Image (tube, helix red, strand yellow):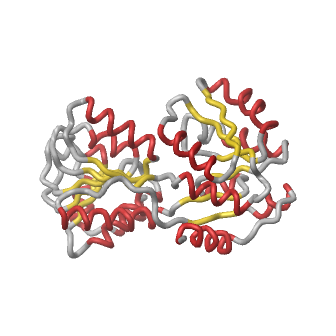
């Protein structure tokens, strides 16, 4: 993040470092960065580089932004903290949310409405369409038919879509719901004998830094692969993962901003258009699973979507 800040022009640095700013500056687009990290910085940088100089873009930190009305024509939240802060404001400036899974965004939107906010909301979701995820696991592990999924108690519309997509693809979805963190290990051990493969979903109550190693090791002992949703999962031991890069998310967000400024309204929420596939050949070898190259899997997945 420090290197990212050093690259910013002086006016952007002044905005970012001004503590307790009363409201957003009068720029066409104000991008609010919720967390420090390379991914958040890259999303913001790609949005800015794509839109300027035709559209002026200012960059802010969440702590420096007051939730009251501002003068920007459009707001962009990069990450959960920025989204939560901006969504509660009682003004009508449109807000585009990035780096938030679909179900988290839907909860955010519902909470915003319940607080009386009339702010128009849209998003580039962090997570992939469920059909795309299932198509990848069928390409990577063609023999897998019983797909294990661990869900938290707040899983809603995403599970319904996943279930419908699994039926369309003749896959047998095996689901365990985790009501409390101390239930995870037991539910996982009960699930594994019923499945051929585990599909990780971006539910932080189940899949997080404190649980992923236990989940991966448990699956590995049963000689079962795990399909992840980030490059970090692949590095940690997932057989294959499907995700979008921060640059891809930022590019799509910039397209939505262009459309919103031209038409006067945000497009509806979208899943990522562009994506990448990462594989772990060492895990594939250990599990005795022949797996294609990342480029080959990506091309085949893109061909399925182009039909």
Left or right: 210 as drawn, with respect to 195? left
**Image x and y of residue 137, in percent:** 68, 57
Q: Where in the figure is residue 190, as x and y percent of width and height?
A: 77, 30
Count of numbered marks = 0
Q: In which quarter of the image is the N terminus?
A: bottom left
Q: In percent of the image, x 30 and y 53: which residue is there?
A: 96
Q: Is residue 61 left or right of residue 119?
A: right
Q: Which of 138 and 35 is in front in this view?
A: 138
Q: In the image, what residue occupies the spot 52% across and 35% down?
A: 155
The percent coordinates of residue 272 (x first, y second) are: 46, 60
Picture quadrant of residue 76 = bottom left
Residue name at image x 61 percent, y 51 percent? 168
* Quadrant showing the C terminus: bottom right
Tell me the quarter of the picture where residue 287 sits.
Answer: bottom right
Compared to residue 212, the image places residue 179 above or below, namely above
As rendered, which of 161 and 205 lies closer to the eye? 161
Residue 263, placed above or below residue 232: below
**Residue situated in front as seen by the camera: 268 or 225:** 268
- Residue at x 32% of width, y 66% of height: 254
- Residue 214 occupies quadrant: top right
Q: Which of 164 and 296 is in front in this view?
A: 164
Q: Where is residue 228 in the image (x, y as percent from the top left)?
A: 64, 52
């Amino acid at each position: 993040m420090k290197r990212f800040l050093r690259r910013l022009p002086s006016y952007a640095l002044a905005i970012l470092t001004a503590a307790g700013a009363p409201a957003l500056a009068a720029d066409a687009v104000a991008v609010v960065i919720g967390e420090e990290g390379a991914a958040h910085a890259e999303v913001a940088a790609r949005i800015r580089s794509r839109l300027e100089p035709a559209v002026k873009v200012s960059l802010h930190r969440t702590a420096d932004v007051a939730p009251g009305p501002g003068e920007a024509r459009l707001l962009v939240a990069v990450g959960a903290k920025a989204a939560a802060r901006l969504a509660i404001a009682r003004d009508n400036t449109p807000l585009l949310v990035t780096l938030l899974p679909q179900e988290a965004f839907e909860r955010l939107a519902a909470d915003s409405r319940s607080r009386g906010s009339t702010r128009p909301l849209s998003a580039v979701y962090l997570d992939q369409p469920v059909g795309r995820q299932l198509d990848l696991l069928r390409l990577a592990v063609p023999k897998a038919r019983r797909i294990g999924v661990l869900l938290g108690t707040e899983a809603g519309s995403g599970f319904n879509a996943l279930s419908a997509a699994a039926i369309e693809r003749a896959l047998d979805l095996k689901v365990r719901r985790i009501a409390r963190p101390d239930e995870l290990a037991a539910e996982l051990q009960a699930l594994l004998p019923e499945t051929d493969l585990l599909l990780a979903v971006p539910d932080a109550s189940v899949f997080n830094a404190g649980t992923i190693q236990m989940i991966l090791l448990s699956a590995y002992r049963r000689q079962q692969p795990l399909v992840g949703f980030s490059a970090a999962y692949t590095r940690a031991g997932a057989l294959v993962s499907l995700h979008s890069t921060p640059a891809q998310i930022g590019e799509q967000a910039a397209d939505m901003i262009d459309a919103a400024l031209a038409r006067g309204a945000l497009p509806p929420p979208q899943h990522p258009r562009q994506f990448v596939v990462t594989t772990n050949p060492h895990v594939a070898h250990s599990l005795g699973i022949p797996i294609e190259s990342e480029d080959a899997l990506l091309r085949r997945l893109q061909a399925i979507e182009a039909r």
